[in-house]
Amino acid sequence: MNSRKLLMAVVAVMFAVVGTAAPVETASAQSQTTASDVAPKVRNKEVPGKFKRRSVRFATNEAPGTIIVDTNNKFLYYVEGQNRATRYGIGVGREGFGWSGVVSIGRKAEWPTWTPPAEMRAREARRGIKLPAVMPGGPENPLGARAMYLYKGGRDTIFRIHGTNQPWSIGLNLSSGCIRMMNKDVEHLYARAPVGSKVVVIGPGSKPGDVAFQDRGLDIFRTIFGG
């Protein structure tokens, strides 16, 4: 068997194992839940394999460099062109905190300071949880290793794409509307997405309008050979 036939045989076997398309599950928003309400067995679970970072075959009418956030299926895509994208697993807003729209990255920060809005502090205080007015960046900070601040019309929306010190929350509806990623993933995206990058957020029940995209599953050749 020559090298070309051997390569094709390997590829065929891998397709048989992983399938030609990544599983996409439509998940409804869970009840309004915060980390303190989650059972220890959930907090100790590993991130499911489908939410690990993957190179995928991806069709869209959006330009390379665009970020598409599919909150229904808990995936964020960084569009690379040539029918390619990097897919990341995310955690999203709990019921009542989902949103959609077209925004952009207005600024970025490494190990950001967390300043919870007054409304959030008041809401959590009613539940007996006291949040700090300001929390310095670091491993205990809920914004994690990186934050990308989402702006619309030159104004801060108060929503962010950020890391998390609760990796078990990836794939769940727990946040107050921010898009959370594993720290290693947010660092990876942060290095690639400059200020000004377009971000399309598709929320529960929303229609993407002119935005079209299709996740066609694992990019087998990039997975094997990189690039």
Image: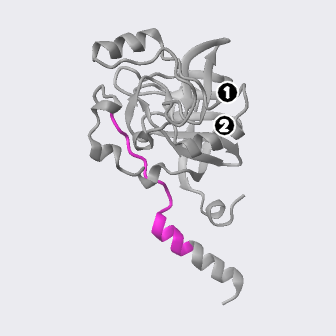
Type of residue at label 2?
Tyr
In this picture, residue 217 sits left or right of residue 206? right
Q: What label does residue 108 carry, if any?
A: 1
User: Which residue occupies 45% across, 39% down?
Assistant: 74
Looking at the rendering, the stretch of residues picked out in magenta corresponds to 12-30
**Image vertical order of residue 5 relative to residue 45, above or below:** below
Magenta run includes residue 28? yes
Q: Are marks 2 and 1 in contact (CB under 8 Å)?
A: yes
Decide which of 212, 144 is in the foreground and name it: 144
Magenta run includes residue 120? no
Decide which of 84, 93 is in the foreground and name it: 93
**Image vertical order of residue 133 relative to residue 70, above or below:** above
Decide which of 223, 160 is in the foreground and name it: 160
Is residue 67 something that shows in the picture? yes
Examine the residues drawn in magenta and state their main secondary structure. Answer: loop
Decide which of 90, 204 is in the foreground and name it: 90
Q: How is the image coloured?
A: one colour
Q: What label does residue 190 carry, if any?
A: 2
